[in-house]
Image (cartoon, helix red, strand yellow):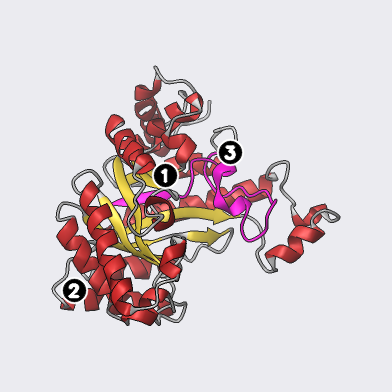
Amino acid sequence: MKKTSFGQVLLSVLILSACAGNKNLPGNSDIPELKQVYKKDFDIGTAINAPQIEEKDARVAAFIPQQFNAVTPENIMKAEIIHPEWNRYDFDLADKLVAYAQKYHMKLNAHTLIWHSQLPPFVRQIKSADSVRLFLNNHISTVAGRYDGKVYSWDVVNEALNEDGTMRKSIFLNMLGDDFVTEAFRAAQKAAPNTKLFYNDYNNEQPAKRAGCIALIKKIQAAGVRIDGVGIQGHWHLGKVPLKDIEESIIQYAALGIKVDITELDIEVLQRNFQGAEVSQRMKDDPSLNPYKDGLPDAVQQQLASDYEALFKLLLKHRDKISRVTFWGVHDGQSWLNGWPVRGRTNHPLLFDRNLKPKPAFYKVIEAKKSK
């Protein structure tokens, strides 16, 4: 008879415990709940889109609160949607999202107030610094003020840095100078005193960009302005998750007295060493450019599982510094990586496949708790 290790027993207990609350829900009611397994460590979140907010698919509608206890809007709180014209705001979907989060007792991490991308057209037509400053302050005051106490956190400024840690050129930098980030946090602090305020970026676990991010955070703090955390987006690549850089970044950011969240997690399985438009044309005649159209081969599944397991073991090691880990999408079919940078490719970067079936990576994330 095969002996059962203590670790296997512990994992079984975790799985049984996590499944206990699933009995009355349709869908994957026989698998562990991520939010329960990691309940004592950090929140487990996901980004959701408009059809999911409106619960148009009953199975997905049941599945999301089953697995996650935090949500982030993929797009509907970005300026181009929520503030389409100078004197007009559209709060319809954002209000629905707030109601959704309240209904399922989920933390709502709002995304994002100030970002150089996905701006409404009128902002790009502004010609004066005074008008850009007026937009920044009015937008933050109106949007963050409306949802203070209803959302847990805001990504106040998103992606303001270049890869070398310098400030990214944008209408905000060009018109307002280096202090626009501090100005945005000051406005958010005033409008949303009951909301956590985060700076969010990608690749800010890399040393050069990390240094720029640390300098930015220190500048905000030196001005006497509140910043509660930094988001490391976590858009990483199969077999190349930079664990050492991630760990060093968590330690250095936390030393500033702020929380460190993983805010947009996915692990891409496809190569990205070519131009999107070029490949989109060639894909019609060369199926090798879209190699996983019918699913992942076992070797790739196992590598993805290994990457996620190593990452979550690292995050558990520093659980005292982390408040949330959010996946950028519920399942593979929803991932933005299916259409970027190459339209039409099939990607598989998340823990659940297109049918909400848990992948080997899901079970490795559960198993990562065994030794903790």
Q: Earlier in the sequence, mark 2 or mark 1?
A: 1
Secondary structure, mark 2, is: helix
| Of pointers 3 and 1, the one earlier in the residue sequence | 1
Which residue is disc 1 drawn over? 46
* Relative depth, front residue between 365 and 78: 78
The residue labelled by disc 3 is 353
- Structural distance between the alpha carbons of marks 2 and 1: 29 Å
Residue at horizontal 31 percent and vertical 37 percent from the top:
101
Q: Are marks 2 and 3 in contact (CB under 8 Å)?
A: no
Q: Is residue 296 magenta?
A: no
Q: Main SS type for the magenta part? A: loop
State which quadrant residue 296 falls in: top right
Q: CA distance from mark 2 to mark 3?
A: 42 Å
What amino acid type should be assigned to the residue bearing mark 2? Answer: Gln
What segment carries the magenta color?
A: 323-352
Q: Is residue 12 visible?
A: yes
- Find disc 2 in the rendering and name its residue: 221
